[in-house]
Image (cartoon, helix red, strand yellow):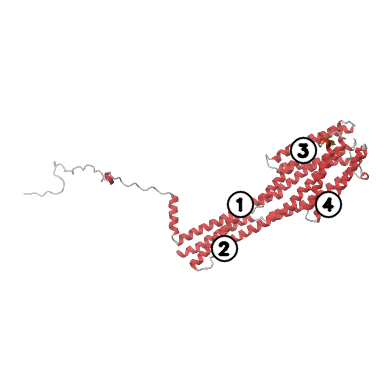
């Protein structure tokens, strides 16, 4: 009997056959008989490259092109608003500094000089009066010293830390008590009839001249700062104007393109964006033009007149101080002028008086030319008229002094009203200049205030309208994109 084998397994005891091992094969030869290698994986591309490819792919379709146009328009409009806000904020800040910082500081510096010089004049006038100083000259001296000290405090509070102005004010604050001490010593010796009083007064005057040089330097520095603020506030915002023109041009081009492709005249979103951008551009140009005109007027008819009047006042104060010191020194201070046969010895203080009166004449003529109305001209004319009388009386006083009549010369300089002293003319000149300064200061504040006011709200308004314009541009393009869905 024969049995068929069931299953596929080998009978017990019989080994399972195996396939012969295949030795590793070499890769097929490559070009020129070299073995070939598997191809390397391509390098990963950067996000920027992929983005550029996607942008190129999108630009081949109308929806893609619309998205790009919308993004560019929104970016242009937002950039226009941002640049406008930035430039106008800087100009508004500079105009605000002109009105509330640099010009007031310049005026304070002029007042410091005026108060110091007038205090020195009052001190010398009181000294000339003899041992019994008049109450009027003493009161005037004390008032001027207090005014100078108060103005220094204000100027120090408003000056920039570490600036030249702050250092100058610190120096003045240090010298002022020293000057006051010398004046008190001069008075004490003068009351007792000691000649040493005159020496102390001349020493005090020398210290005051240093202080006046510092005060005049402070005045010039603040004037330069004022001019710098004007230079920052008045230039046209050309960058913002250029970006605005570009943004409006882009919006107009987009609407024209939309019309050519769809025959639709208006796209509400783009029209709104164009209108908002146009309003910003017109507001920018007109507003800044008005502000520029106001600021230029405040400089031409305010600051220039104020500077000229302050210079005239400084010259009159110097002249009066030298006139008094001529009598105090009694020829003790001289210098040689000229050369050769023309060389001569002159009184230092009287020579300086003549120089300052020439400067006063020049400054008053310039101030009269700058005055643009009768309210500004009249006080300058009054100052010029009193200056002429002052010169005539000074000649009479010098004639008395030269002839040996010291008391007669003294009466014509600091005497009573019956003596017709030069001091009366000086006071009239100073009062007229003060009136002219008040008028010109008012003119400046009105013009500068109008210029500053023309910029109000422009920075914020430009930013808000730019955001609205960008939203309009996006909505307008979005309206067109919805037609492809």
Q: CA distance from mark 1 to mark 4?
A: 46 Å
The label shown at residue 211 is 3
Q: Nearer the viewer, mark 3 or mark 4?
A: 4
In the rendered view, would you say 425 is above or below 241? above
SS at badge 1: helix
* Residue 142 appears in view: no
Q: Which residue is mark 4?
A: 381
Q: Is residue 5 left or right of residue 215?
A: left
| Marks 2,4: beta carbons within 8 A | no
Seen at 58% across and 60% down, the residue is 277
User: Which of the pair 354/2 is nearer the observer?
Assistant: 354
SS at badge 2: helix
| Marks 3,4: beta carbons within 8 A | no
Q: Residues within 10 Å of mark 1 (few under 14, many from 20)?
A: some
Q: CA distance from mark 1 to mark 3?
A: 42 Å
First in sequence: mark 3 vs mark 2: 3
| Marks 1,4: beta carbons within 8 A | no
* Residue 248 appears in view: yes
Q: CA distance from mark 3 to mark 2?
A: 64 Å
Residue 242: x percent and y percent?
58, 56
Q: Residues within 10 Å of mark 4 (few under 14, many from 20)?
A: some
In the rendered view, would you say 116 is above or below 273? above
Q: Residues within 10 Å of mark 3 (few under 14, many from 20)?
A: many
SS at badge 3: helix
The label shown at residue 86 is 1
Q: CA distance from mark 2 to mark 4?
A: 59 Å
In the rendered view, would you say 9 is above or below 196? below
User: Which of the pair 50/295 is nearer the observer?
Assistant: 295
Q: Residues within 10 Å of mark 2 (few under 14, many from 20)?
A: some
Residue 283: x percent and y percent?
63, 59
Q: Which residue is mark 2?
A: 272
């Amino acid at each position: 009997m024969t049995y068929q084998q069931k299953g596929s397994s080998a009978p017990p005891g019989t080994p399972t056959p195996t396939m012969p091992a295949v030795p590793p094969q070499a890769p097929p030869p490559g070009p020129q008989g070299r073995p070939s290698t598997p191809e390397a994986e391509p390098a990963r591309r950067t996000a920027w490259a992929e983005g550029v490819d996607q942008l190129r792919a999108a630009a081949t379709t109308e929806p893609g092109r619309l998205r790009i146009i919308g993004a560019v328009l929104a970016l242009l409009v937002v950039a226009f608003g941002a640049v406008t806000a930035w430039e106008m904020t800087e100009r508004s800040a500079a105009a605000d500094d002109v009105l509330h910082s640099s010009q007031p500081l310049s005026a304070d510096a002029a007042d410091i000089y005026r108060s110091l010089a007038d205090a020195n004049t009052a001190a010398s006038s009181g000294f000339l009066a003899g041992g019994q100083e008049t109450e009027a000259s003493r009161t005037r001296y004390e008032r001027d010293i207090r005014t100078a000290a108060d103005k220094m405090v204000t100027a120090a509070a408003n000056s920039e830390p570490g600036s030249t102005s702050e250092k100058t004010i610190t120096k003045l604050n240090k010298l002022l008590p020293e000057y006051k001490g010398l004046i008190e010593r001069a008075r004490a010796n003068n009351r007792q009839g000691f000649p040493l009083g005159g020496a102390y007064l001349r020493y005090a005057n020398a210290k005051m001249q240093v202080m006046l040089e510092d005060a005049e330097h402070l005045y010039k520095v603040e004037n330069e700062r004022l001019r710098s603020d004007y230079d920052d506030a008045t230039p046209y915002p050309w960058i913002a104007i250029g970006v605005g023109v570009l943004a409006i041009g882009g919006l107009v081009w987009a609407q024209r393109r939309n019309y050519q492709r769809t025959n639709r005249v208006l796209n509400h979103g783009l029209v709104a964006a164009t209108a908002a951008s146009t309003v910003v551009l017109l507001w920018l140009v007109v507003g800044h033009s008005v502000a520029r005109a106001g600021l230029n007027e405040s400089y031409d008819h305010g600051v220039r007149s104020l500077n000229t009047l302050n210079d005239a006042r400084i010259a009159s104060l110097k002249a009066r101080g030298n006139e008094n010191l001529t009598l105090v020194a009694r020829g003790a201070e001289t210098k040689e002028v000229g050369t050769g046969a023309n060389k001569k010895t002159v009184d230092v203080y009287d020579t300086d008086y003549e120089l300052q009166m020439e400067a006063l004449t020049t400054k008053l003529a310039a101030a009269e030319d700058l005055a643009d109305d009768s309210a500004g001209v009249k006080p300058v004319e009054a100052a010029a008229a009193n200056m002429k009388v002052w010169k005539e009386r000074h000649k009479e006083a010098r004639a008395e002094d030269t002839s040996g009549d010291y008391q007669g010369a003294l009466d014509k300089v600091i005497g009573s009203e019956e003596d017709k002293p030069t001091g009366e003319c000086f006071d009239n000149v100073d009062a007229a200049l003060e009136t002219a300064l008040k008028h010109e200061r008012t003119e400046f504040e009105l013009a500068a205030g109008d210029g500053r006011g023309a910029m109000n709200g422009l920075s914020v308004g430009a930013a808000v309208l730019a955001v609205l314009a960008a939203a309009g541009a996006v909505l307008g393009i979005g309206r067109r994109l919805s037609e492809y869905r």
